[in-house]
Amino acid sequence: MTEEEQVVDLLSAMVKIPSVAAKEGQVADLIETFLAPELKAGLIKRERISYAPGRDNLVLRIGNPNAQRWLGVDGHMDVVDPGNVNKWQFPPFSAHVEDGKLFGRGATDMKSGLAAAVVAFKQAAHEKLDHGIQLMATVGEEVDNDGARQLSAAGYGDRLTGLLVAEPGNSNVDAAERGIIDYTLTAHGKAAHSSRPDLGANAIHGLFAFANAALTATAPLQAKEDPILGHATHNIDIIHGGNQINSIPESAYLRGNIRTTMIADNDAFIAALKQAAKTTVPKGVRLSLSIDSVLGAAAASPDNDLIQLVQTARQRAGLNRGQVAYRTGITDAALFYHDGLDLAIYGPGNETSHETDEYVTLKDVFDSVKVFKDVFMNY
C-alpha cells in the first residue's frame, strides 16, 4: 500500500466515526492499530488518559527520552455536530471521495491534520532522533478544550520547547491565537401583570442596563491594537427572557463572547465585566455574573524557530512559503503555551470547517505529511 493510500484509508476511517463530543476512544483505537508495528517494536511509547467512558486522550512519544528539546504535536479527535444531514451533498460521516476531495464532518477540522501528523509520526519513529516528539490526540476540543485542559493540568506540556498544532489554515503558518472569555449575565426580577409594572421588576430592563455598561466598559480594551493579534472583540450573542407578552419577566439572561489579546487580556476584560455588573438597574432587579470559560491568548514571535522550520519544509516539498498570521479562533495551543515556547499552528484544510459539505483536498493532506515529517526530523 502506498503512503497516499495509507493516508486516505486512515483519514476515511477517522471521518466515519461520529465523534461529536463522544467516541474519541474509537479514533484513538484507529491510531493505535495504524501504529501497531511500531508500538510492538518499542519504537513508540504510548499512554491513554481517560477523560470519560469511551473518551481517551492518546499521548505518543518517539525520539530521545532524555532530550532537552521536545516538540509537541497536537490534534483533536472530536468534531462539531453536522447539523441538518439532509442538506449535505454526501452523508456527513461517509468520508466520500470525489474529484480529489474527501467530504465529511471533521474532514478539514481537523481529522486530516491529525491523520497527516500520525502518518508522518509513524515514519519518523524509524529514524534516530536526538530530540523528542510527543503527539497528543485530544478529546473535547470543540466543546471547551476538555482533553487539552486535562493533559495540561497533568503536566504534559511542561517540558515542551515547541508546539505544532495541526489545525487547518489554508496554507497559513500561524504563530499566535487570541484568548477567549465566555460569560453569562443573569438578571433576577419580579413577575407582575404588564398593566402594573409598578408591582414587578423587569429583568430584561436589567439586561439592557448591563449590556450598555459592559459594551462601554470594554470599548477602551477593544480599541487597543496588539502588534501581533490586532484588536480584541466583545459580542453579546445570546439573549433570553420573558414568558408571555402580558407578563413582566422575572428572569432573563444573556451570554457574551470576548476574544482577547496579550495587551487587552482576560484579567482586564473580566474586571470590566465585574464593574459593569454593578451598574444601576431598575428597582427590584439584581444582576449576577458568571465567567463560564477562559483561555488566555498565545502569541509567539512570527519568526520563531518552529515557524521557520515549517516554512523550510514547505519549500522542500515544492510549496510556497505560507503567510504568517494569527488565529481569531482558538485551538488547544493556549493550554500548552508558556513563555519561550516556539509555536506554529499549521495543517491541511480550508475554510469549510463547521460548514455543510465540509471537505479537504487530498493533495493538501499528502503535502502536509511531507511537511510534518521534515519538521519532525529536523526539529
Image: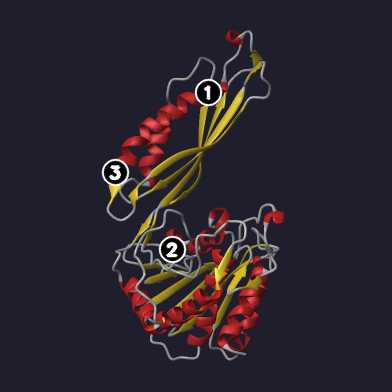
C-alpha span from label 2 to label 3? 26 Å
Where residue 269 sits: x, y (%)? 38, 40
Q: Secondary structure at mark 3?
A: loop
Q: Label 1, on which residue?
A: 286
Where residue 368 sits: x, y (%)? 47, 76
Image quadrant holding the C terminus, namely bottom left
Q: Secondary structure at mark 1?
A: strand
Categorize mark 1 by other alpha carbons within 10 Å: few (<14), some (14-19), many (20+). Answer: many
Instruction: Kindly identify the amino acid type of the residue bearing the numbered disc 2.
Output: Phe
Q: Nearer the viewer, mark 2 or mark 3?
A: 3
**Frontmost residue, 190 versus 84:** 84
Residue drawn at x 60%, y 83% as measured from the top left: 6
Q: Label 2, on which residue?
A: 336
Q: Secondary structure at mark 2?
A: helix
Q: How many marks?
A: 3
Categorize mark 3 by other alpha carbons within 10 Å: few (<14), some (14-19), many (20+). Answer: some
Q: Label 3, on which residue?
A: 224
Instruction: Kindly identify the amino acid type of the residue bearing the numbered disc 3.
Output: Lys
Q: Earlier in the sequence, mark 2 or mark 1?
A: 1
Q: Is residue 138 visible?
A: no
Please identify the quarter of the rendering in which residue 137 is found.
Answer: bottom right
Where residue 234 sits: x, y (%)? 42, 40
Mark 2 vs 1: CB contact within 8 A: no
C-alpha span from label 1 to label 3? 32 Å
The image shows residue 290, relative to residue 142, as above or below, that is: above
Residue drawn at x 42%, y 53% as measured from the top left: 328
Mark 1 vs 3: CB contact within 8 A: no
Categorize mark 2 by other alpha carbons within 10 Å: few (<14), some (14-19), many (20+). Answer: many
